[in-house]
Amino acid sequence: MFEVTSDNRLRRLLVVGDRVLIKPKSPTDRTNSGLYLPPTVTEKEQVQSGYVIKVGPGYPIPSAVEDEVWKDADEKVKYMPLQAQEGDLAIYLQRNAIDLEYDGEKYVVVPQSAILLLDRSEDLA
């Protein structure tokens, strides 16, 4: 699995909003019967999987309107966190993914709404 460490450049990336940075798993290049598939076939599958590398802060929550004008307005934006966490295996819809390349590696950025399932190695309880 690929992780964000202090010595690599991924730690400088900031994912915005409700988006998730995913390192796609290498697709299988063979069918069950052993035939080799060209990369264009496997890239166009509707459902893909990969490891979550970084997550955005989440959905912004609107601040409550205060009627007391003499109080200082707290301008800090609050977020509802995402369900995805770094290290999860995500199964996502390819049609909502944006492909990008960073430092010679291929990644995808998907909104959390495009993630169908998360496989977390630790217990959820």
Image (cartoon, rainbow, N blue to C red):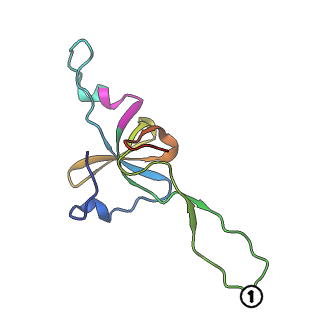
**Snapshot quadrant of residue 27:** top left
Location of the N terminus (image quadrant): top left
The furthest residue to the right: 67
Q: Determine the residue located farthest toward the bottom in the rendered image.
A: 70
- Residue 57 lies in the magenta-colored region: no
Which picture quadrant has residue 92? top left
64 over 83 or under it: above or below: below
Taking the magenta stretch, the answer to whether it contains residue 44 is yes
**Relative height, residue 107 to residue 27 (above, below):** below
**Residue 26 as seen in the image, left or right of residue 117:** left
Total numbered circles: 1
Residue type, label 1: Trp
Residue 87: x and y in percent read 35, 48
Residue at image position (66%, 80%) is 73
Vertical relation: 107 (above or below) 119: below
Residue at image point 46% right, 41% down: 96
How packed mark 1 is, by other alpha carbons closer than 10 Å (few <14, some 14-19, many 20 or more), is few
Counting from the top left corner in percent of width and height, residue 15 is at 41, 58
Residue bounds of the magenta highlight: 42-49
Q: Nearer the viewer, residue 86 or 106?
A: 86
Q: Which residue appears at 44% of the width and 36% of the height?
A: 95
For label 1, the SS is loop
Residue furthest top as drawn: 33
Instruction: Identify the residue position indicated by label 1 in the image.
Output: 70
- Where residue 14 sits, quadrant-wise, is bottom left
Q: Image point 37% across, 41% down: which residue?
A: 121
Q: Is residue 117 left or right of residue 67?
A: left
Q: Position of residue 104 (x, y in %)?
A: 20, 51
Q: Is residue 60 left or right of residue 56?
A: right
Q: Give percent across and percent down for residue 57.
A: 48, 60
